[in-house]
């Protein structure tokens, strides 16, 4: 972000219509969008945010879950086969569900 963009943002927040940063953050249109995590009580949103990205990215060509070198190194350094399976599963969940979330 350039200095002119920061200056424009500061100018816009200080406009009388906005009323400053405190007034902006207290606005009802803004407060529901401030949370980094979605509302998990809405089932349609849960399907949209978790199941569809997992289904699309799981079989994506060139993805690491397809047995790439990165995963293979981690599997070979695991204590036993069960640890290798669980660490691969854990990596896939974190990589495909939580990394694209923000």
Image (spheres, rainbow, N blue to C red):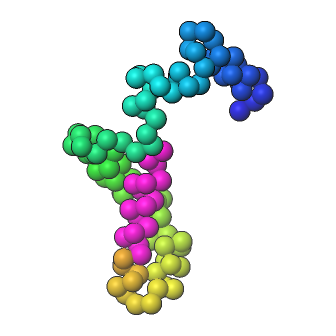
**Residue visible at 53% across and 79% down in the picture:** 73
State the image coordinates of residue 2 (x, y, percent, origin top left).
75, 30
**Where, by quadrant of the figure, is residue 4 drawn?**
top right
- Outermost residue on the bottom side: it is 80
Q: Is residue 56 visible?
A: no
- Left or right of 94 on screen, residue 3: right
**Where, by quadrant of the figure, is residue 10 drawn?**
top right
The correct choice, above or below, for 75 with respect to 20 in the image is: below
**Residue visible at 49% across and 73% down in the picture:** 71
- Outermost residue on the top side: it is 16
Q: Nearer the viewer, residue 87 or 76?
A: 87
State the image coordinates of residue 65 (x, y, percent, origin top left).
42, 65
**Residue visible at 56% across and 9% down in the picture:** 17
**Residue visible at 44% across and 71% down in the picture:** 67
Q: Nearer the viewer, residue 41 or 100?
A: 41
Look at the magenta stretch and give its main secondary structure. Answer: helix
Q: Nearer the viewer, residue 11 or 57?
A: 11
Count every numbered label the image shows and give the total: 0
Q: Is 97 included in the stretch rendered in magenta?
A: yes
State the image coordinates of residue 7 (x, y, percent, origin top left).
74, 22
Q: Is residue 55 visible?
A: yes
- Tell me the quarter of the image containing the N terminus: top right
The correct choice, above or below, for 22 with respect to 53 in the image is: above
Segment colored magenta: 87-102
């Amino acid at each position: 972000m350039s200095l002119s963009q920061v200056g424009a943002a500061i100018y816009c927040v200080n406009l009388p219509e906005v009323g400053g940063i405190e007034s902006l953050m207290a606005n009802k249109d803004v407060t529901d969008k401030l949370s980094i995590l979605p509302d998990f009580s809405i089932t349609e949103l849960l399907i949209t945010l978790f199941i569809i990205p997992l289904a699309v990215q799981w079989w994506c060509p060139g993805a690491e879950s397809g047995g790439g070198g990165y995963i293979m190194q981690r599997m070979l350094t695991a204590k036993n086969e069960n640890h290798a399976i669980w660490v691969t599963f854990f990596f896939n969940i974190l990589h495909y569900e939580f990394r694209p979330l923000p």
